[in-house]
Image: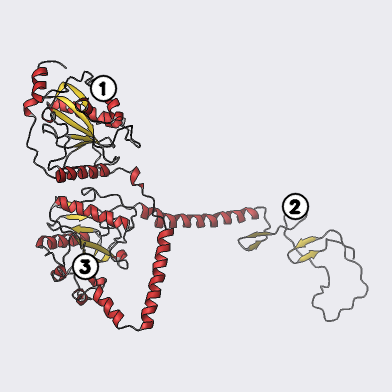
Amino acid sequence: MATKDVVLSAQGPLAPQAQMPSVANLNINKSSRVQIGPKFVTVTQNVQNAEMVKGKCLCFDLISGHSYGGLRCAVAVFVCWSLIVATGLSVYFIYIVLPSQRTRLDLGVQADWYLRRQDWQAMPAYDVEYLNTPVPYAILGHSGLKYCDNKYDCINEMLYIQRDNLRRELGDIGPNFLIAGNGDLFEGRGANVVPAMVSSWNRKSIAIMLLGDYRTEIPKAIQFERIDFLLKTLVEKGALKEDYVLYGHCQVKTHFVSPGLNVVKELRRFSHWKDDNYTTCLTLPLPKYLWNVVKNSSRTERVSCVVALVAVVICVTLIVYFTTRPENTDDTVDMPPHEWNITRQMWLAQPYNNSERTTHFDPLFIVIVQHSVSNECRRFVSCAAELRNLQSYFIDTKQYDIPYNFLIGNDGRVYEGRGWGVVGAHTFTYNRCSLGLGFIGDYREEINPFTRVTEAQLNRTHMLLEDGVRLGFLRPDYQIVGAKDLQVTASPGSNLYNALRQWPNYDHQKRFRGLSCEQIYEKYKNEHL
């Protein structure tokens, strides 16, 4: 039988329609595959070049007798991919986007003994990981460092601990909260942030630390009252479970002295405290334990331990070497307060009795500008720290307060030094009858690198001096001079000095050089400058 073009089906080739041949005799032996008479095979097809459409969609063969079979396949693919994408976006949103939007839980405590991070001028954390609150445990420890019982010393201790913890790559100060000897309660990492105190317990506990070494210090009742208040508040805010368990640091990290024997003995006063591993807190700490382990081990065990220790040291060294610390964006973020005029209380100045006043010469004629010849600072935290360093230097070495009436930071803020109406210690002979301004930095262009005065600094200085006129501390026709206009000195540095010379109030005549305060007052008190 001659064949022409064939039509393909899923079962194989089919002959085209033709007239049946005439057969006279037909012998069939045991065949089930022979059809006697005409056989009709219906092939549903899309008539296009006389071919059968065969489609595959999502691992199924679709043979459709309709022209829109391919469209159904496309819709199915679209729906399935849409579900996959939607599921992926949901997972990303729930597990990545939403956790990244969390913020520190504020306890809502409004009391002068509760200091939030901004109150003790904490540096921004390098890394923040949030707890799945509420957590079932609270752990109490001590810093093992300097004891403090006044706000200024304790703030310095907090800053020291945070710097130390950052150097040890903990990402921030370790505990969630810290308590001073006078009962002041400091926010550390905060109520809903994973602490860094006991590695295996960090993600299921809130860490509380007493400032000081309570192996020798005696804890005060006010400290325990504040701990109890804190724990109750954490439960109310949903950070701690109602049936939480309180442990001492040494109970979860055996052969460890924290929180100190004198605190451990008082833990029974807390209703949620449990005495698990309590006896380990009362035995000698790590040295004796290690000695007993070494003494009771075989030579093979000791050699194995040494080999393991060397391997651990090598691994840790390699990890530290090849691991880079996350980039600190602290340089681009300024912390509050965002006011331009910063008081002594805001930069945490030490109290000092500056009793000598400029009353006899008020309102003052002269504004004397100097530079501090110290490190630059371009954020509030840095400038406040620089002022505290300067004040400590003058108190410790000169036995007087920071010498300037006001200081101008590189961040453009004005920081109160001795303030209005107080005699400074900035320019010998002229202190009693002048206002002393100190610009933070070294503005000598002859020395590289040098500090460049900014428009923000100059503008804020104008604002300060306008306030002085308005408050009656400065004459409206006050004159600005650099310290070098009155004495043999390089201050305030050529870069700043050249900027001052452009001001309309600058004293180009150098009329005050060589005169005492009394002479200046008598000569110019009735004269317009």
Q: Quadrant of residue 94?
A: bottom left
- Give the spatial CA distance, label 3 vs label 1: 61 Å
Q: Is residue 386 left or right of residue 225?
A: right
Image quarter in which the C terminus is found: top left
Q: Is residue 438 left or right of residue 68?
A: left
Which-is-in-front pick, marks 1 and 2? 1
Which kind of residue does numbered mark 3 sit on?
Answer: Ser
Categorize mark 2 by other alpha carbons within 10 Å: few (<14), some (14-19), many (20+). Answer: few
Categorize mark 1 by other alpha carbons within 10 Å: few (<14), some (14-19), many (20+). Answer: few
**Dot 1: what SS?**
loop
Look at the image and tell me whether residue 348 can be seen. Answer: no
Identify residue for label 2: 48
Q: Does the CB distance between marks 1 and 2 fall below 8 Å?
A: no
Which-is-in-front pick, marks 3 and 2? 3
- Residue 220 is situated, as x and y percent measured from the top left of the image, at 10, 62
Identity of the residue furthest to the right in this view: 24
For the residue pair 218 and 291, the one nearer the viewer reads as: 291
Q: Which mark is residue 503?
A: 1
Which kind of residue does numbered mark 1 sit on?
Answer: Trp
Q: Does the CB distance between marks 3 and 2 fall below 8 Å?
A: no
Q: Determine the residue positioned at 17% across, 19% down.
A: 511
- Residue 68 is situated, as x and y percent measured from the top left of the image, at 64, 53
**Dot 2: what SS?**
loop
Identify residue for label 3: 258
Q: Earlier in the sequence, mark 3 or mark 1?
A: 3
